[in-house]
Image (cartoon, rainbow, N blue to C red):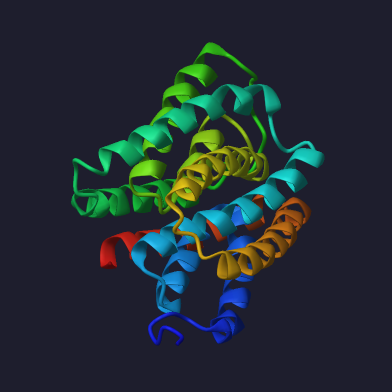
Amino acid sequence: MPDPFFPGPEVLLYGLPLAFLAGFIDAVAGGGGTITLPTLFFMGLSPAQAVATNKLLAIFGSGSATVQYWRKGHVDRALVLRLIPLALIGSALGAFLVRFVDPNTFRTLVGVVILGVGALVLANKRFGLEDRYPGLTNRTLALTLPGALIIGVYDGFLGPGTGTFLMFLFALVGFNLVRASGNARTINFATNFGAFLFFLIGGQMVWWIGLPMGLANAAGAYLGARMAMLRGSAFVKWMYGGIVLLVAARLLLT
């Protein structure tokens, strides 16, 4: 007898288009998880199932976007390959800290911080519009190495807005917002994949939901990455501002 509390295939009627939209948004400015995670909860999945399944579909979207940015030369490989191990270590540490600290304690603080980051990006008219990345200088490494570790901890600990924070970090060291997005998506793919392997062991993934939504997310991410590269940093900047508001609303109002 079917479980009356478990979702049926009809939930994909709204799950697939929302996953597509989330993939598009995430590939441009980050924050796709603010759409997919509530969608999975609304479908009727338990918190553990929703979080695990969200990581399953996220690797499709972040992987699709990473491939597009990587192929077009919008990923600084020398830098991101140095940062990925630190982001993975941070993510694992963040997941460990959840056991000892209530994440809700930090939601308001992080919500206020991300609003401040968004205001800074939008108020500075030239921020992120020109590529002024100086290469692997001491300043670049002094900002990005600890930054990747700290954002990785946040990703494992709480999560919403990780890609948005990564974009700000890369723009801060001189990348335009298109290249910042490409670098951020690559780091985010690595942390998503690491979390996916962790949740795979737990056996909580709902595959028949996660796989089709993952494909929809990948299709949206493909289109989003192409659009970002076609329209340029000015387009990404205003999308970024909208995502900041979306992420902050989720952190402050939930």
Q: Name the one closer to the observer, 168 or 251.
A: 251
Locate residue 228 relative to residue 242 in the image: left or right.
right
Tell me if 135 is positioned left or right of 100 in this view.
right
* Pick the front one: 65 or 233: 65
Residue shown at 48%/52% (left/top)?
A: 122
Whether residue 140 sits left or right of residue 224 in the image: it is left
Quarter holding residue 207: bottom right
Expressed as whole percent of the image width and height from the top left, the position of residue 28 reads: 63, 55
The answer to whether any part of residue 241 appears in the image is no
Locate the N terminus and report the quarter of the image it occupies: bottom left
Q: x and y percent of residue 29 in the render?
A: 57, 54
Whole-percent x, y for residue 254 in the image = 28, 67
Above or below, comparing residue 208 to residue 188 in the picture: below
Task: Report the residue at 66% width, 42% height from top.
Answer: 182
Q: Is residue 142 above or below residue 53?
A: above
* Residue 156 placement: quadrant: top left
The one nearer the camera, 245 or 13, is 13
**On the image, which quarter does residue 134 sit in?**
top right
Vertical position of residue 64 compared to residue 11: above or below: above
Relative side of 232 to 79, left or right: right
x and y, in percent, of residue 81 in the image = 62, 25
Residue 233 seen in this snapshot? yes
Task: Please state the total of marks drawn on the protein image.
Answer: 0
- Residue in the picture at 61% in, 28% down: 80
Residue for point 34% across, 41% down: 95
Residue sitting nearer the eye, 206 or 235: 206
Q: Residue furthest top?
A: 138
Furthest toward the front, the residue is 1
